[in-house]
Image (cartoon, rainbow, N blue to C red):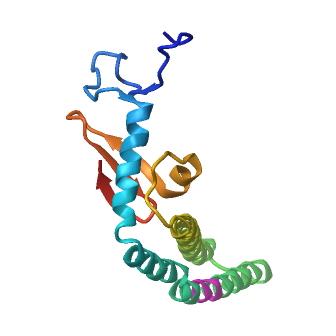
């Protein structure tokens, strides 16, 4: 009935009818998901002030990257030192005759030290970026949540996008909403 008056939108697992193993999760009608979202959101709204304060604390924690910045500064200094040592090693080898085995060991040691420090820098920069993105997501959640002053009576798609991280359906028909602040509510 996709074009008739009985048309309805359903959501189902991609594995529902594919392959040997068929997903046992029942399909969900879009209207049911929206209605359950309203119930879950209104439950979340009951503790609005506490949740907003928790989000502020979480956002402050996520944006405080002073420890990461200190570690990055130390590692960048380490990289500068290793780079200078590598240059000296190369210059000494070019200017005077020496054992190539010793040179290769010193050079490879410098390169390994550099690569280790560089990998740590990359990991810390990724960690910092991830934390700042999470802080932005929490900020969007807080803004959307603080704008809502009363219970929802009808579905709002922009609120859904700002508030919900994921919705998980289970075989027994349960639907659990995970909100951007990490709170899970079964509806």
**Furthest residue to the left?**
172
Query: Quick check: is 76 in the magenta stretch?
Result: yes
Give the x, y percent position of residue 21. 27, 20
Q: What's the residue at 40%, 56% (across, down)?
A: 41
Query: As rendered, which of 179 and 1 lies closer to the eye?
Result: 1
Query: Quick check: is 6 in the magenta stretch?
Result: no
Occupied quadrant, residue 139: bottom right
Q: What's the residue at 43%, 59% (across, down)?
A: 151
First to last magenta residue range: 72-77
Occupied quadrant, residue 87: bottom right
Give the x, y percent position of residue 159. 54, 54
Give the answer, above or below, for where 157 lies relative to 123: above
Q: Taken as a whole, is the magenta stretch helix, strand or loop?
A: helix
Give the x, y percent position of residue 150. 46, 63
Give the answer, above or below, for where 23 lies relative to 140: above
Query: As rendered, which of 14 and 57 lies closer to the eye?
Result: 57
In the image: residue 78, left or right of residue 173: right
């Amino acid at each position: 009935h996709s074009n008739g008056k009985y048309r309805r939108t359903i959501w189902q697992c991609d594995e529902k009818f594919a392959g040997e193993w068929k997903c046992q999760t029942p399909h969900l009608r879009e209207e049911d998901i929206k209605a359950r979202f309203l119930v879950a959101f209104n439950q979340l709204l009951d503790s609005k002030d506490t949740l907003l304060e928790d989000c502020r604390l979480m956002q402050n924690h996520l944006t405080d990257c002073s420890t990461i910045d200190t570690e990055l500064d130390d590692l960048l200094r380490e990289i500068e030192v290793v780079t200078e040592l590598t240059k000296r090693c190369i210059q000494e080898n070019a200017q005077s005759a020496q054992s190539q085995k010793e040179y290769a060991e010193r050079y490879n040691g410098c390169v390994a030290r550099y690569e280790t420090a560089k990998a740590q820098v990359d990991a810390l920069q990724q960690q910092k970026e991830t934390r700042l993105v999470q802080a932005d997501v929490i900020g969007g959640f807080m803004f959307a949540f603080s704008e809502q002053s009363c219970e929802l009576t009808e579905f709002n798609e922009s609120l859904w996008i700002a508030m919900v991280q994921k919705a998980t359906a289970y075989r027994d028909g349960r639907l659990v909403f995970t909100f951007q602040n990490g709170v899970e509510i079964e509806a």
